[in-house]
Image (cartoon, helix red, strand yellow):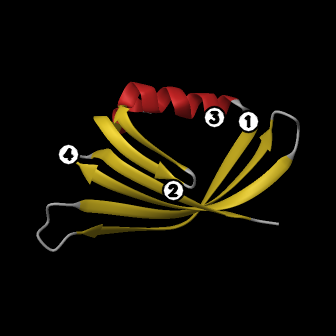
Amino acid sequence: MGKYYTDTLMAAFDGCTFSGPRSQYLKRAKIMRDSLKDLSIKLYDWQSVSSKDRKEAWVTTWTLRSFTNSKGHRDSMEYVQDMQFKDGKIVKTGEYVRLLK
C-alpha cells in the first residue's frame, strides 16, 4: 500500500488530522485495520478533476464500508474520500463519514 503515497503526506478525517511521513501514516492505518475482524468496501462512484492551471489533480470516491469490529459487532458507514495526487501518488487525503443506523 505504501507505493501509492508520497514520502510525506497530509490526511484529515472526521475528528483527527495527520501530517508526516508515509511510514507513520501506514503504521496508524495498519493498527486501525488490524482492529477489525473483516472489512468490505463497495465503490459507488468516483470522479477525477484537475485544477484549471493543471497543477493539481484530485480524485473523489464514494464508498460503503461494512466491517466487524474486534467485539463481533457488525456495522456500515458511507465514506467520501478526496485524494490529491502528485506524480501519480497520494499527497493529501480527506475522509468524511456518515454512520448508517
- The residue identified by callout 2 is 95
Q: Is residue 40 left or right of 71 when viewed as pictured? A: left
Label annotation for residue 36? 1
Q: Work out which quarter of the rendered image holds the C terminus and state it.
A: bottom right
Given residues 28 and 40, the one toward you in this image is 28
Label annotation for residue 16? none
**Which callout, 3 or 4, points at the residue further toward the start of the chain?**
3
Label annotation for residue 87? 4
From this view, report whether residue 4 is shown above or below residue 75: above
Q: Residue at x 71, y 31 (%)?
A: 35
Q: Residue at x 67, y 29 (%)?
A: 34
Residue 25 appears anywhere in the view: yes
Q: Whole-Å distance between the Cαs marked 2 and 3?
A: 14 Å
Q: Residues within 10 Å of mark 3 (few under 14, many from 20)?
A: few
Residue 1: percent from the left, percent from the top? 44, 33
**Which callout, 1 or 2, points at the residue further toward the start of the chain?**
1
Eye-nearest disc, 3 or 1: 3
For the view shown, which residue lies furthest in the left direction? 53
